[in-house]
Amino acid sequence: MCCGRPFKVIGPIIAVVCVIGAYTVASHMFDVWLALAFGVVGYMFKKLGYPLAPFVLAMVLGDKAEDAFRQALLLSDGSASIFFANGLVTTMMCLGLLLLSLPAISFVYGKVTAGKSKGGAVSDGASSRYDGPDAPAATTGQ
């Protein structure tokens, strides 16, 4: 519910206002079709469970990031070595590349560890501790 009204009432109103706004910018039907296409893409992303925040950040910061990237390459005459020019920049670039590849690394790590656990008995660590009669009280769960 939005503003005390159900979304089935507010949703179509928002869609109509968006389509009217897309048309009034340049009076081209292409803009309307583009807005409708991105609406369908947004609906698909919502149904597939993609988060909204990264797309909003990309739309807001994308232009500025692209301009800064182009300016850096122009200053360095097209050399990508400017992104590794000093220690701070190199650290930030490596950290960014690591965070970018983290999903792939965790996927591969999960596959490797799952393959190892299928080959033998899964150990919860209990068999490696000493639970004999003269074991300390901390290891017996008391």
Image (cartoon, rainbow, N blue to C red):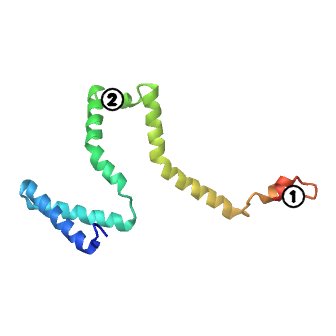
The alpha-carbon separation of the residues under discs 2 and 1 comes to: 62 Å
Task: State the count of labels.
Answer: 2
**Rendered position, 86 above or below 93:** above
Q: Position of residue 1 (x, y in %)?
A: 31, 70
Q: Residue furthest left?
A: 27
Instruction: Tell which circle, 2 or 1, labels the residue nearer the N-terminal end.
Output: 2
Q: Secondary structure at mark 2?
A: loop
Q: Position of residue 116 (x, y in %)?
A: 66, 58
Name the residue type under label 2: Ser
At 36% across and 28% down in the image, what residue appears?
82
Characterize the local packing of mark 2: few (<14), some (14-19) or many (20 or more) Cα atoms within 10 angstroms: few
**Quadrant in the picture for residue 137:** bottom right
At 35% across and 65% down in the image, what residue appears?
46
Is residue 11 or residue 42 the one in the foreground? 11
Characterize the local packing of mark 1: few (<14), some (14-19) or many (20 or more) Cα atoms within 10 angstroms: few
**Rendered position, 59 above or below 133:** above
At 29% across and 62% down in the image, what residue appears?
42
Q: Position of residue 85 (x, y in %)?
A: 40, 25
Res 30 seen here: no
Q: Position of residue 100 (x, y in %)?
A: 44, 46
Res 46 seen here: yes
Q: Which residue is mark 1?
A: 131
Is residue 138 or residue 99 the one in the foreground? 138
Q: Which residue is mark 2?
A: 79
Name the residue type under label 1: Asp
